[in-house]
Amino acid sequence: MRQVAILGSTGSIGVNTLDVIRAHPDRFQVVALTAGKQVDRLAEQCAEFRPAIAVVSDAEDAARFEKLLCDQNIDTQVMYGPQALVSAVTESGCDTVMAAIVGAAGLVPTLAAAKAGKRVLLANKEALVMSGNLFMEAMKLGGGELLPIDSEHNAIFQCLPVQFTKTPHSNLGVEELWLTASGGPFRNTPLEQLNTITPEQACAHPNWVMGRKISVDSATMMNKGLELIEAFWLFGLPLEKIKVLIHPQSVVHSMVRYRDGSVIAQLGQPDMRTPIAYGLAWPDRIDAGVAPLSLTQLASLSFAEPDLERFPCLALAFEAAKAGGTAATVLNAANEIAVAAFLDEGLPYLQIPAIVEKVLHAIPAVNADSIELILDIDEQARAVAREHAQASIKNH
Ligand code: NAD
Ligand code: MG
């Protein structure tokens, strides 16, 4: 029986994780759930799954949450604040952690899971992008298992030989990783229309239902940029061997090209319950509640090179990946601030790449060798990005 802690249980990945767990009570027990602000949803989840620990953001939410639990006689221990997210990992008795908080807020508890030797199911790509080397070292020292949940990386993991993590990729004949990308809702939108894009349009992804931040990242293709950096750290191939391919149907979730001419792909419905179930039960395969894929009902599968002019965020991510060190931390922080300003404060859509570019060029990359330094650079980059965002909103 796996004991599972879910960081970010009220989000899109969190809810899908509970959906898979719900169908397999003989395999999984939920021991900790955490949420940012959605206290009512978290209380419903606690009523159903009865975790030992539940975490909310602050004291005020905790008081309201505690009352909701008390009214239903639920004896889950309530905690709050960033340090409590770490406690949910280290004190709940979990052996498996679903890292599904969005953004930098997930870094410290996910790193705690890595250090503690847990099976880490990594959805929170920003945590790995920010801390790359440090995170992979923590995984190695902790001795746990890192299983990618992001659909592309999960696909690649499925297409690699099982001995991959223990044998150099060159000995196994792995030549290239091909990350597929849908191209998002604006793949064919005339460029001159992009500046009037609204948050609702940006969040209406053609194939996937996801949280708002990752939906905007998919529209700008910063998501694929973050995924490129994620793949670099997860699989240890040189950057030039990781390629991005536009594949609008989102059926081929990614591919591995081998030396002998073979290309191995993983296909499936665009439903995150497939990679979630794979990570939860690995190396077993369990029912994920996903409809079977019918190839004969697909009109076609097509592939194309990404257009870096249309998607400058992808080019910026390539640039940060090449620069190495803290460049990816800066890229991620600037993007988080710009996307939040676009979603909530009226920042024009095309200012997202403009702000990321300015911040990336304002803060020189240094070696990312301690968590303190990474958090400090993250804070600096956010401050610079906020200034630019405020100025753009005022001028608009
Ligand atoms: P979401 O916005 O739906 O959910 C985010 C979760 O994190 C919620 O439970 C929220 O309460 C919590 N949270 C947010 N800010 C917090 C904070 N400051 N402190 C504590 N908790 C906080 O996001 P999502 O779509 O589920 O994505 C989660 C992560 O998974 C992201 O990193 C995303 O890139 C990645 N991911 C998501 C999908 C998907 O299909 N949704 C696919 C691949 C990867
Ligand atoms: Mg993905």
Image: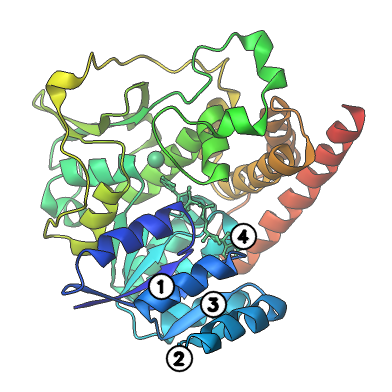
Task: Residue 106: give x, y in percent of width and height.
Answer: 53, 63
Does residue 65 lie above or below 10 as drawn?
below
Inspect the image, locate mark 2, and give the three-letter code of the amino acid beneath it. Asp
Mark 4, other Cα within 10 Å: few <14 / some 14–19 / many ≥20: many
Inspect the image, locate mark 3, and give the three-letter code of the amino acid beneath it. Val
Q: Which residue is mark 1?
A: 113
Judge depth for marks 3 and 2 and give the one in front: 2
Judge depth for marks 3 and 4 and give the one in front: 3
Q: Is residue 155 left or right of residue 11?
A: left
Q: Tags 1 and 2 in contact by the CB under 8 Å rule?
A: no
Instruction: Using the image, tell me which numbered label, if any, was put on residue 374.
Output: 4
Instruction: Using the image, tell me which numbered label, if any, was put on residue 55.
Output: 3
How far is disc 2 from disc 4 in space, using C-alphas? 37 Å
Q: Is mark 3 within 8 Å of ligand 1?
A: yes
| Residue 277 seen in the current view | yes
Q: Tags 3 and 2 in contact by the CB under 8 Å rule?
A: no
